[in-house]
Image (cartoon, rainbow, N blue to C red):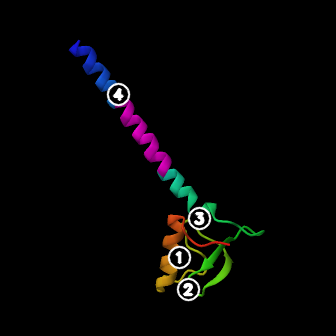
Amino acid sequence: MDDRLESIIRSAARNAGKRYEEVKRAYRDGRDSSSAHSLPRDGEGRAKIVCRRHAERRAVAVDGKGRPACFDPDHPDCRGCVEDIREGIVETW
């Protein structure tokens, strides 16, 4: 009986570990694809975001690192915008 119980516990632990890795991978892939790739786009494929620095609507290209074409690395609002894009919480229109 102890061998059977041990086998069941090991099997359950293996299945839980596999499932955990699947969920972790899906979450990571989902976050990666949801950032810049899921932003609303205009007719030319540019992301439609609200600029934090100038408080205006903009249609801009966004690179693979989630940085809009107007990004200024020295400006705190621009850095915050990039963080928002990566987190999927940037304001859009």
Mark 3 closeness class: few <14, some 14–19, many ≥20 residues within 10 Å: many
Q: CA distance from mark 4 to mark 2?
A: 52 Å
Mark sitting on residue 81: 1
Earlier along the polypeptide chain: callout 2 or callout 1? 2
Disc 2 + disc 1, Cβ < 8 Å: yes
Q: Which residues are magenta?
A: 14-27
Is label 2 or label 3 in front? 2
**Coordinates of residue 39 in the picture (x, y in percent):** 64, 65
**Coordinates of residue 22 in the picture (x, y in percent):** 45, 40
Q: CA distance from mark 3 to mark 1?
A: 11 Å
Say what amino acid the circle numbered 3 marks: Ala
Q: CA distance from mark 2 to mark 3?
A: 18 Å
Disc 1 + disc 4, Cβ < 8 Å: no
Q: Tell me which residue sits at (59%, 75%) in the image.
A: 68
Earlier along the polypeptide chain: callout 1 or callout 4? 4
Tell me: residue 13, above or below residue 51.
above
Earlier along the polypeptide chain: callout 3 or callout 4? 4
Q: Nearer the viewer, residue 61 or 89?
A: 89
Mark 4 closeness class: few <14, some 14–19, many ≥20 residues within 10 Å: few
Q: CA distance from mark 3 to mark 4?
A: 38 Å
